[in-house]
Amino acid sequence: MRGLYRYLSPFTPDQSGALSVLFELGGLVVICDAGGCAGNVCGFDEPRFYSKKSAVFSACLRDMDAIMGRDDRLIEKTGKALASFPEAKFIAYIGTPVPSVIGTDFRALKRMAEKQFHLPVVTCATNGMDSYDKGEEKAYRALIDTFACGSGLSSAEHVPFAGVWGATPLELAAPGSAELIRNGFTEDGVPVVTFGMDSMLDDVRRCGSAAVNYAVSPAGLAAVQYLQQKYGTEYYVVSPLYRTHGKNAGAGSRPSNADDSAADKTESYVSGGMPHPLTGPVLVVHQQFMANAVRGIIRASCRSLPSGAPETDVATFFDFAPGYAEQGDSRPAGEDEFISLVKNKGYRTIIADPLLARALPGFDGTFIPLPHFAVSGQLHAVRSEAEFLEPLYRELGRV
Amino acid sequence: MKDEPFSVTIKELAARGFSGMPEEFIPSCGLVYSSPATLSYNSPGALGFGVKRAALVIPESVMLLVAPDCCGRNSTILSANEGYSRRMFYLRMDETDLVTGRHLTMIPDAIREICGVAEPRPKVVTICITCVDALLGTDLERVCRKAEAETGVRVVPGYMYALTREGRKPPMTAVRQSVYSLLEKKTKRAGMVNLMGFFSQVAPSSELFELLHRAGVKDIKQVGTCRTLDEYMEMGAANFNLVLYPESRFAADDLMKRLGIPYIELTRLYDIEKIDRQYALFASAIGVRFEPAAYRGAAERALESFLGGHKKCTFALGQMINASPFELALSLAGYGFAVTHILATPAEEDFACMKRLAELSPETRVYAPTAPSMMNFAPVADGVGIAVGKDIAPYFPGAAHVSWNSEMQPFGFQAVADFFAACEAAL
């Protein structure tokens, strides 16, 4: 039955994706909920919550607030909280199912709060029902619309830099992945900003003047495409694991050499020895660009084998950019479609978050764990990118 | 200038009373700061027994959560950690469902599918709905009756309405009613008592069991120890219910009305004298005589032992503990210890002991843990010997920590003895 999860459990929703983008930017973030959503977002979907301080609040809505639509009361509560956090650089309101049901007018809320507090206000009309990347997209767009300056920056602010978008803990392999991505670009001598991790509000302000933008996830792709539309900045899709130069800056098509570039990095990363081919067909499940990168690793590892690389498909439960997909790649709508996909295609190797194995009780092939925080949260979280890839490399016989 | 973390002295809080309590202590009057401390208890179902896990104490049952994805996200992690993931099922709502109510018509089919895959086959399915259905005005009882008629499986309504947390029937009160809702009227068994209040069991080492047995009670039932639905259903034959936690009062009232089972409330206390008095009153109410001297002696010895080594120990108390923080503070102050901080939201019943606490320890500061100003709370490095409560450990890095939050519920003299033993061990 569509919508029924008999084996799986819900993935990270859009409201958590929105917070993931905003978490480190120094704003006063209000999750417009009754309490439970804020608990879920902070406690289960935000790995930085216990290590970095961020001013995240629950609106603590009650039934009468919802029934009467008391936005003025929410503004009043925000004002009181600002007294405890006067250094807030902006205010953000993140939606949940409650405002979705009562039809909260987030644009009106934004205007009311801006007028009252003379601070920039960002709103994300998330609903708790979409996937996390939709929330990331909304947050990126709201930030760009509110803060980005295409012109009007001082010369001091006009330092050339490259922007990496879609780099949140929900998209990447491990806590240190954003740093790895930045380090991967240092050879170009251009400073790199990863939007979503380790960046500041000032970086968002000057994002319109970036020399180039990179997307490491489909949510990041939506952001860089918006920036291209708004400021004409060229963009590339790159691997979230290894820096790759997708030469095609235009929208829609796949960078032709992404897999080869990933392969080159892979070759230098792992030690020698003959690779052990995975039994095909292989299915890789993650956010689409991560899964593409893993497919690149498999192909690179098997390049020297007479049999070549096994047939490898990518699937994602999240945003799916057809322009970056190959024939056979897919987006299962839910648990039933995922089970059917595996059964119909007869996959012999599945590389996916360990939680997804629950949906495949009869699967007798090889299951290689590839944790995705948006699927299993802290349950299977890893500390480093090396740890993230270790099971795959072990299976490939190269560690 | 930043607001200091909001706090008042016990003296001031007692003088203001429940109705005059500063609004910083009322979560819905302000934004709630999401700190690790508040997350430990502020979110329904965040840790320990939230609505979902609580409803699953019905033996041989499973839960179908009918809700947006965000409502079930914590269960992805918690159900795996706490071992009930195979009993949780999800019917994910989308925006069309909000408009059409289509999700409600899918429930019978969903139950049939669940029964086809769940091992063992469930005898009860609890349907849990959340804030969105509260706003849509869903009549879940009717939905459950229809689903039960169509599927032949018992279907129980469960409500995770965070929007109503300060209302007449907050979620954790409502779920207690759901948990006992399947009980049916049975022939009374004179020697049978139900312990109500907790979802897990009362510590078997509590003297309560021994005292009841000696008073002629042969069978003591707790929902947390029932392994089968049949065993659970036997609770309908109890002679009376003992309510050990106030959130079960509503459920006990319901059982009194529906099944004619009366109830008596006992409070979890840490004051040895009061525990003794409570047992005497209880014994007299049921017409028996308790002899708890030996158990009292054990509690006194544990206290004396701790006093002997740590007479000047100072305490900070959190909210997420197996005690009322205010009653525990009063007991500790009565034993001669200093209580410097309480980080807890007082409930109405806590004010019963507030006046006496104000006399004994007027300068104890009570902090509003959910207030936005708590983000400015500077961790206390010195001056506190023991911080009680997992929720407040990060605020007192210089203190020894006693979680005092085990799922096995301490009660009576045993609670006092074990508490001081835990403090001794922590130091």
Image (tube, coloured by chain):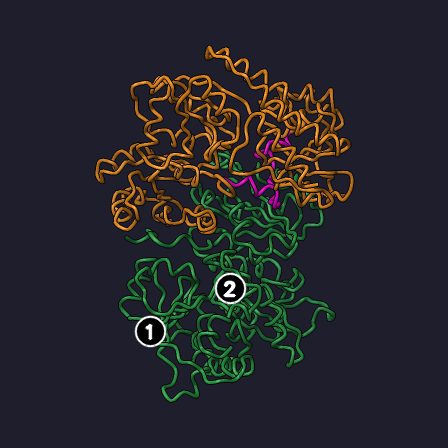
Chain colours: A green, B orange
Whether callout 2 and callout 1 share a subunit is answered yes
Residues in magenta, as a range: B23-44
Residue A171: give its label: 2
The residue tagged 1 is A328
Q: Is residue B32 magenta?
A: yes
Badge 2: chain ID: A
Indicate the amino acid at tag 2: Glu
Query: Which secondary structure, mark 1?
Result: loop
Residue at horizontal 62 percent and vertical 47 percent from the top: A114
Residue A186, how many percent across, how many down?
65, 78
Would residue B131 be seen by someone viewing this image from the given angle?
no
A18 shown above or below B271: below
Residue B156, how many percent across, how many down?
33, 35
Residue A159 shown left or right of residue A30 in the figure? right
Are there few (<14), some (14-19), or many (20+) residues within 10 Å of tag 1?
few
Q: Which image quadrant for residue A7?
A: bottom left
Q: Is residue A303 magenta?
A: no
Residue B314, how many percent across, how many down?
74, 34
Of residues A156 and B229, the one drawn nearer to the viewer in this rendering: B229
Residue at horizontal 37 percent and vertical 70 percent from the top: A366
A120 shown above or below A195: above
